[in-house]
Amino acid sequence: MIFTTPTQFAVLALCLVAGWLFGRASGGRGARERARLRELEAEHAAYRRDAEARVKAAEVDRERVTRTAPVAPAVTGVRPAREM
């Protein structure tokens, strides 16, 4: 038999209890964390849709302004700077 002394049985019991506690600490929140992850993914998707809609609206507005705004004529006859 592997465990023959009371100290070995005590260590075995301590390891079993520690394993049980670690398992409870790490496994109890799985469903809650998955639900929170789905919620955050939905929020992120909504944010992305909103941001893409705003970018598209800004691009349409930019196109409208560039089509209707007159283009400034090129500057001609620029004098060179004075030399010292």
Image (tube, rainbow, N blue to C red):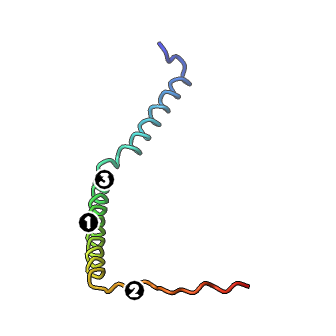
Pick whichever, 72 or 83, lies toward us: 83
The kind of residue tagged 3 is Arg
**Residue on which the image places disc 3:** 32
Q: Is residue 81 above or below residue 46?
A: below
- Residue at left 30%, top 66%? 47
Query: Hey, which residue is sitting farthest front in the picture?
Result: 77
Between marks 3 and 2, how big is the CA–CA gap? 64 Å
Between marks 2 and 1, how big is the CA–CA gap? 40 Å
Callout 3 crowding tier (Cα within 10 Å): few <14, some 14–19, many ≥20: few
Mark 3 or mark 1, whichever is nearer to me: 1
> Residue 19: x, y in percent?
44, 35
Position of 6 with respect to 39 (left or right) is right
How many dots with numbers? 3
Task: State which quarter of the image contains the C terminus.
Answer: bottom right
**Residue on which the image places disc 2:** 73
Q: Earlier in the sequence, mark 3 or mark 2?
A: 3
**Residue on which the image places disc 1:** 49
Mark 3 or mark 2, whichever is nearer to me: 2
The kind of residue tagged 1 is Arg
> Residue 75: x, y in percent?
46, 85
Q: Secondary structure at mark 1?
A: helix
Position of 79 with respect to 29 (left or right) is right
Which picture quadrant has residue 38? bottom left
Callout 2 crowding tier (Cα within 10 Å): few <14, some 14–19, many ≥20: few
Q: Is residue 68 above or below residue 14?
A: below
Q: Earlier in the sequence, mark 2 or mark 1?
A: 1
Callout 1 crowding tier (Cα within 10 Å): few <14, some 14–19, many ≥20: few
> Residue 24: x, y in percent?
39, 43
Q: Earlier in the sequence, mark 3 or mark 1?
A: 3
- Residue at left 60%, top 84%? 80
The kind of residue tagged 2 is Pro
